[in-house]
Amino acid sequence: MKAVVSMEYDIIEKVNEVAAAGGSLEDRLERAARLFAEEFHFDQCLFFLAGSGGALKLAAASSGLCTTGVLCYGKGEGLPAVAMEKGGLVEAQKEPGRAEWEGVPDPGLEGVSTALVYPLGGGGSFSGVVYLKARERTSLSPARKDLLKVASLQAALMIRNAVLLEDHRRAHAELLAMQEKLASSEKLLALGDMAATMAHEIRNPLLSLGGYAARLKRQLPSGSPGLVYIEKMSQEIGRIEKIMNGIIRFLNDNLAELKTDDLNCIVDEALDIFADEFSAHGIAVERRSVHAPLTVLADREQMKIAFDNIIANAIQSMEKGGALKVVTSRSGDFAVAEVSDTGGGIDPEHIGYIFNPFFTTKKHGTGLGLPIANSIITRHRGGIEVRNEGRGASFTIRLPYSGAASVSSDLLPAEAGRVV
Amino acid sequence: MKKRILVVDDEEGLRLLYKEELEDEGWEVDLAASGEESLEKLEKDSIDLVLLDIKMPGMDGVEVLRRVKEKWKDLPVILCTAYPHYKHDFGTWASDAYITKSSDLTELKQTIKEILGKKQ
């Protein structure tokens, strides 16, 4: 008798071993399925797990019978639904000449004479079912049925643990990502303070330098060899001045005046500024928009600076000609502007960095154009995304449609632009 | 008679640059290194236009502008600064022009000419 008891409880120990083992949930369920089929002398054991909409999906099966056609049970379908409804074991035998089992059709039971289904879990909350099938008629003794319940409960715990572990891992990864983002925004803040101080301290002496260089240039006799050097000095000073102006603008882009505006007009005005450059570089402009106004709350000057930077970036990528497509439309709660060029797109290695201050691939770029655009758009509670599309890059700018959502004038910290 | 411009800036290098450049254009130039000094000079001398830096230690340009406009309503003031956001500051609305500082003084000279021309 003692031997029988130890043999009976052997399965519990084995299921425990499977549950405690490493590896994916699917692997462990498959081992459990083989164990269940073997121990309870059925031809096949399958585990179905609850998915979205109450459907049960096949998660693991032992070999033995063909499983085709029973990869998924919809809500309320087949014997598994009967077992979940009942909250307990369903044992069904094939009745000669009848297609139904326990009053329901089950396509997974072709060539099967005995089926046993037990819901996984308890307290009315089930994570799935364990499904045993046998070709011949068979039945379990009450003691074996109790054992099946215990083993199933163990399997349910294993599944629950795996789900919790997965949730925990996801939450942990999100937390790490958030921490990283926070650390980098703190660093950016400190960097911003430093840059503001530096910009101010550098700018004034720089203006003196540039001003005196210009005076010196006027005083040198024409043909003097020094003129070339002075010219070079002025150019370089001009370059630093441009960078300083960019930094100052980047750090001081407060939205002073949010007014009801039309995104169509803002975009049109920004495009107008570049009319000469478009023709100089042989760039064809295609402009499409909806006829209704795209109402947004915007600081028009700031928003124009944002679009200036995005358009200038596109022009720089098409200096030898190309096509610029600018489409404005409404999408749900957002007014959307899409600016696409044919300038060859952005190197996939660089695409994640193009909204970072001071990142540039251009010889004379300041690395501030797109970060400024991103910062302005973010402060308008909008977003900017970039992706390579067709023969170039495509920027999508989304601003809250002001008829659809209330926008407070609270400023938001600038966030990184998104790459899709 | 030559028009007289008062340049108010805490940077010595810039004061001298403005002086030489504006004198080349045929104006007389007076210099003040601080807001306080500029008000003293305005009391003593006859000035036709003030070129005013905003960011200065002590009394800043916005405060100087307020005091100037209280006492000499018609005296034109041009505000100079590196920071475009001052444009939105109520205190600066009283100025006659607003110039972003640059080593290229063309825009500044043009603005001075326009304002002094209108005054005549």
Image: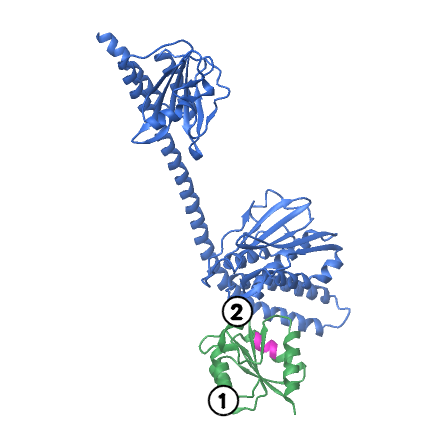
Residue A317 sits above or below residue A255 on the image: above
Q: Which quadrant: the C terminus of chain A?
A: top right
Segment colored magenta: B14-18
Look at the image and say whether residue B17 sits in the magenta stretch: yes
Viewer-closest of A319 and A132: A132
Query: Label 1, label 2: how many angstroms apart (C-alpha)?
Result: 26 Å
Q: Tag 1: Cα neighbours inside 10 Å, few (<14), some, or many (≥20)? A: few
Disc 2: host chain: B
Chain A rendered in what hue? blue
Task: Where is residue A90? Give x, y as percent.
Answer: 34, 20
The residue that label 2 is drawn on is B85
In the picture, one chain is green; tell me its letter: B
Q: Residue furthest front?
A: A97
The residue that label 1 is drawn on is B71
Viewer-closest of A362 and A346: A346
Q: Amino acid at mark 2?
A: His
Q: Earlier in the sequence, mark 1 or mark 2?
A: 1
